[in-house]
Amino acid sequence: MKPSKTTQFLTLLLGFCYCALTLFSQSSLAENVWLFLGLMTLANALLFVCVFRAWYRKEAFSARYVMSWAIAFHLLGLFGLPLFEDDYFRYLWDAYHTAQHGTPYGVSPSNYFNQPIKAPFADILGQINYPDIPTVYGPVFQYSFLLGYWIAPGEVWPLQLIYSLTDLVLIWVLLKLASPIKVALYAWCPLVFKEVILTAHPDGLAVCLLVIAVYCHQTRRPGLMAFTLAASVAAKIFAIIAVPFLLWKIQVRYWLLCLICLAGLYAPLLITLESDLLGLTAMASDWEFNSALYGLLRLGLDDGSAKLLLAMVLMLGVGWYWLKFSGLQQEGVRFLNTTEANQKTRPPVNIPRLDWVYAGVLLCMPVINPWYWLWVLPFAAIHLNPTAWLASAMLMMAYLTGWNLDWLDQLGPYHQPVWVRPIEFGVILLASLGYWAFWRRPKKPRINPMPVN
């Protein structure tokens, strides 16, 4: 059964909206944050109406239908340019530094300000944000930057191509883990279109590796799971949160394999004995942007107390969920220690609610950039978490900063108006309360009246 004509028309309108975003990124209006937010809001509205209307009407989406439109949207986005972001200058510089010196680690970009640098990297160097801080990107990201450098040095389009292809792989794997109508929420998502395809944020690569690890966990391939999980951690340390959920009760050799793969991915870039931890430490200690719970606590607590309290809450919350999840897995996970013949008769393993886990962690962090939500969305598609999709739309408000609003006489470049966060996170909170109160509220069983004699 094909989607209805209305659904196909809404999908086509979404494509036109992405075409408008692509043209917008190349136009002289590309710095107009209000027009950008208008286009993103329209795209989110079209996506939500299209998918949830089809869900309510029990329309069938085929995997081919979802994937075909996803490919079309990704191809369209490749003609666009990064919007409201300059992080890609750091990616291009890291690749250049790795090609020239064998590693991106150990030296901050500002050390090269007074040295002769070949074009176009002299211009790239001058546009790197926070040039006094060494790179925060892990080795797997660095290898992807280097691959882009080999394709076209100093150009962002190879990274857009690499991460678009990676995202299509992620969508293909998701289609093996969830129904096509759920996957459409991720495959056609405006946040993904903007952050992965247009802006070339590499987080999608780490998330792709993590989703492959989850798929390998489901399909009883512990060796490949250990490698992809290590690669995801080596891309971004954020992936380490998923490790206990996937490696729980697995034979020790797979833990060792994961550690060996992690060390092997880091080793080629550690010629100066420095790593991404130097930059990550500076980021964790000094940066604050668009935070939710952390920003709220900072109204009454100092920095150290707020971080300590939130760390304790996270440890208790994630630990409680892990104990609950591991209890559900006692039967299903045993396949990892059985023979191949026995594995085929085992039921599939439950997929952890990493959408809850990563959303909780992000809401406690001092920095919440919109692309960080990429860690939530694949699992929000698998488990159909409507609140997470509303949050993906609301987080676009993070771009309302002094720089983008041209309010530098009133705000700092990365400061937000005081009304932004109450609206942004207030809507998310209200949606969450509504979701738990109505959508997930246990339905009372109907009691038939006793017959009257």
Image: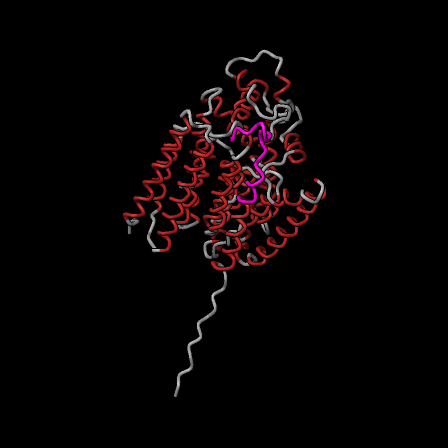
Residue 433: x percent and y percent? 53, 55
* Prevailing secondary structure of the magenta residues: loop
- Nearest the viewer among 282 and 390 is 390
Q: Is residue 147 left or right of residue 269?
A: left
Using the rendered view, name the quadrant where residue 93 is placed. top right
Q: Looking at the image, can residue 224 be seen?
A: no
Q: Residue furthest bottom?
A: 453
Q: Is residue 194 left or right of residue 62?
A: right
Q: Relative to residue 56, is residue 390 depicted above or below?
A: above
Q: Read off the magenta span.
A: 405-423
Q: Looking at the image, can residue 266 be seen?
A: yes
Residue 48: x percent and y percent? 40, 47
Q: Relative to residue 430, is residue 37 depicted above or below?
A: above
Scheme by which the image is coloured = secondary structure
Quarter of the picture containing the C terminus is bottom left
Residue 206: x percent and y percent? 52, 37
Q: Residue furthest front?
A: 409
Q: Residue at x 54, y 32 (%)?
A: 140
Using the rendered view, name the quadrant where residue 151 is placed. top left
Residue 5: x percent and y percent? 27, 47
- Nearest the viewer among 118 and 403 is 403
Verify whether residue 409 appears in magenta.
Answer: yes
